[in-house]
Image (cartoon, rainbow, N blue to C red):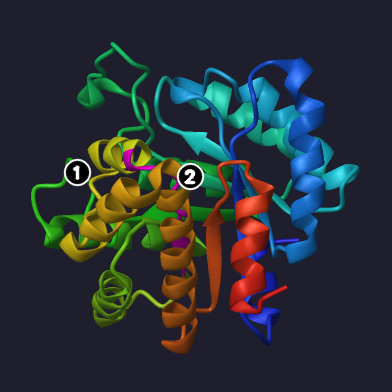
Amino acid sequence: MKIRDSIAASTSPFYSLEFFPPKERENWPGFFATVERLKALNPLFASVTYGAGGSTQDNTLEITSHLKNVMGLEPMAHLTCVGATRERIADYLRRLREVNVDNVLALRGDAPKGQDIDWDTAEFRYAADLVRFARSEQPDMGVGVAGYPAAHPESPSFASDLRHTADKVNAGADFIVTQLFFDVREYFDFVERLRAMGVTVPVLPGILPIQSLESVRRILSLCGANIPGKLYLELDAANEKGGAEAVKDAGIAFAQQQIRSLLDGGAPGIHLYTLNRADTCLRIAEAVGMR
């Protein structure tokens, strides 16, 4: 089933989940046990990543197939432009359909560490190119894309970033999943600006529970998200008072607050970046009341 149809049919707020499968096969049983626990959230779909440059694409195919055909979830496999050719993407899309996977998330992607990419010569320069190609190869496949409430770190302006987001939808994307953010006003402003541009597809807010001060610093350096000064001071104070566990508790409490505000403001559902941590996600859902 296409995810866009499930979103349209949903009559109440929902969760969707993003998983980061382990590279080592011996760690897969533990990963699947985590997924099984998070089925308690009745997720509308499960997004499945792969390594930079498609380095674990075959793993993603096998794991995505298992989520769909053994565990009964609706998976969404990631696609990226990095190192992609038309032949490889066409083959991957075909193999996904052979194992009954009906949805993909089309991303530009990041270069593997230590490598530079000449985007001017790449076969797929923008995520919109990937969306367009996926649509031509598999017209009946569902296609989601990413959106950046705080703008992509490489975008020259917010306006430019919004145009690229609209381009992805105009190329055939069914819905948008946002990058993480820490100020819900950024999400609602992002949606409002897209609607003013004629973009009507669903926009799902992506929430990542803060686990530690180190993780916050790493995330901010990678994705360009902003953290409110008040929140950072609260996390720093928690760290001084109770260490890493207190920071985690504060991060979970803040995620709960975000979710309540988003749902009260009309967000259709919540996309949880799970970090493969079932306890954290279940704790958040229990407090919010969405289980």
Query: Is label 1 in a helix, a strand or a loop?
Result: loop
For residue 213, side relative to residue 77 (left or right) = left
In the image, residue 173 above or below residue 96: below
Disc 2 marks a residue whose amino acid type is Ala
Residue that label 2 marks:
106
Q: Residue at x 64, y 25 (%)?
A: 22
The amino acid pointed to by label 1 is Pro
Dot 1 crowding, Cα within 10 Å, few <14, some 14–19, many 20+: some
Q: Position of residue 108 (x, y in %)?
A: 37, 37
From this viewpoint, which residue is outermost toward the left?
156
Helix, strand or loop at disc 2? strand
Q: Nearer the viewer, residue 236 or 108?
A: 236
Image quadrant where residue 235 sits? bottom left
- The residue indicated by pointer 1 is 153
Q: Where does the N terminus fall, quadrant-wise?
A: bottom right
Residue shown at 55%/42% (left/top)? Answer: 275
> In the image, which residues are magenta?
204-213
